[in-house]
Image (spheres, rainbow, N blue to C red):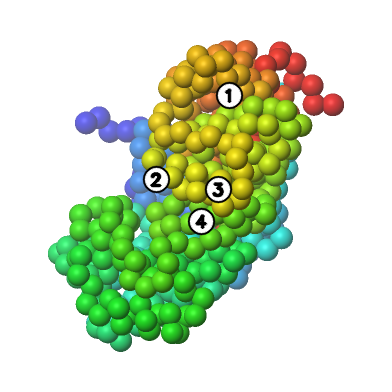
Amino acid sequence: MAKLDLPVYIKQELTVTIIDLSYQGLGVAKVEGYPLFIEGALPDEVVDVRVTKITKHFGYAQALKWQKFSPERVTDVDNRYLQTGIAPLQHMTYAAQLDFKRKIVTDLLKKAHLETIAVEKTRGMEHPFAYRNKAQVPVRKIDGQLEIGFFKHNSHDFIPMDNFLIQDKRIDEVLCSVRDILREFHIRAYNEVQHSGVVRHILVRRGYYSKQVMVVIVTRTAHLKYATEIAAKIQSECPDVLSVQQNVNSAKTNVILGAHTNVIAGTSEIEDQLNGLTFKISAQSFYQINPQQTEILYTEALKRAELTGDETVIDAYCGIGTISLNLAKQAKRVYGVEIVSEAITDAKRNAAVNGLGNVTFKTGEAEKWMEKWQTKGIKPNVIVVDPPRKGLTNSLIESACAMQPDRVVYVSCNPATLVRDIQKFMELGYNVSQPILPVDQFPQTTHVECVTVLSRTNLNDWD
């Protein structure tokens, strides 16, 4: 292999000025035009670094000493949250985090030559900590006892923790109680190297409004010794725990939950509210992690859908019906489609719980159902999409545009695929007709959600 002709080399120590942040939140410096990515560094800082990895086009370096700090730096931070990736932006002021997330979107638009599309300021939280309503925490044996915690970045180094910073504080308390109870009953922690032991993860959900708590003990083995006694002790110490369940995952995998879950004590689900609607939440349900920001996200999506009560709406990734049922309160008819059959079962039940009869849910691929609905003469005024991080398929975009809705409301969790998909919509005659709204669903992390409206028009009039 030919030697790379680069301006830096492995283990080289040098002083650099940070000029930008990558979308992953890494500081960016350039040495003779060659980018170096440095974890924990912020723009305008001057840092002594050591080069740790090089490729043909970029490299990585470790910060050794700061010569100059950014005014946007938060100094009172816990390095465990940086090391594990729980809060990779906790060293940045929250105002700077919001600016950074808007910049992620504007930079991607500029790269795609779409810089004329306006982007609003990121909608943030008043208190950007302790917001997560769900925890999935690994369990390991450290120094002879069962511990909860997280792994360091790209490693198998386990860091015991009992305060997870961005989780609902009550969830942290319940996790610690369950940990201590498992210790009391001498339940063995999972060993991933030997694929032995029992408890792999502890999952805890908590309703933001209902305050109801669910505990799921994820085990490698189908048999959990003292399961009934453990569940009774959990509910005795934590009276707000309405559900204690065991999920069995015997596979050698990084996937957290297995296919089989059984109730040990209490109910099979808890419930919570979003924008006044009640949702039943099971162990495996997809339910938005940050309920406070989700209410803002959905409210803004509905506002941009411009519903008057006479519209037909299709929700192409409906899940358990969270967006569909919000839409159903303001539309004449809503059709929701989702490929996961269990989610559709939950969606139908949630519609019944909320007394909403103007919504139809179907299991399957959105493209195929849109073709069927189009054949039946169903013409949506608005199509709403809220896809996973991989974004939309070309076939879905083509199917959506073929139905010729007035508007497509795109709720995105990945700005990169959003911008890619915007370009495809534009090829088919749909343009961004309102400024994109970034919403901070995950403070202290690099993730950002966006609400985008595409209209069947050639005008981008935002006045």
Q: Amino acid at mark 1?
A: Ile
Q: Name which residue lies at 61% across and 48% down.
A: 355
Q: Which percent across, then down, holds residue 265? A: 37, 73
Q: Nearer the N terminus, badge 1 or badge 3?
A: 3
For the question of whether residue 199 can be seen, the reply is yes
> What number is the disc on residue 352?
3
Q: Amino acid at mark 2?
A: Glu
Say whether residue 458 is left or right of residue 201.
right
| Camera-side residue of 201 and 334 | 334
Which mark is in front, 1 or 3? 3
- Distance from Cα at disc 4 to Cα at disc 2: 12 Å
| Camera-side residue of 271 and 139 | 271
For label 1, the residue is 422
Q: Which percent across, then down, holds residue 61? A: 43, 50
Say whether residue 252 is left or right of residue 303.
left
Which mark is in front, 1 or 2? 2
Which mark is in front, 1 or 4? 4
Q: Are marks 3 and 2 in contact (CB under 8 Å)?
A: no
Q: Nearer the N terminus, badge 3 or badge 4?
A: 4
Q: Amino acid at mark 3?
A: Ala
Say whether residue 459 is left or right of residue 396.
right
| Camera-side residue of 69 and 459 | 459
Which mark is in front, 3 or 4? 3
Q: Amino acid at mark 4?
A: Lys
Determine crowd level at label 1: few under 14, some 14-19, many 20+ residues with C-alpha closer than 10 A: many
Say whether residue 60 is left or right of residue 303.
left
- Distance from Cα at disc 1 to Cα at disc 3: 35 Å
For label 4, the residue is 280
Q: Are marks 1 and 3 in contact (CB under 8 Å)?
A: no
Q: Name which residue lies at 34% across and 66% down.
A: 263
For label 2, the residue is 342
- Distance from Cα at disc 1 to Cα at disc 2: 30 Å
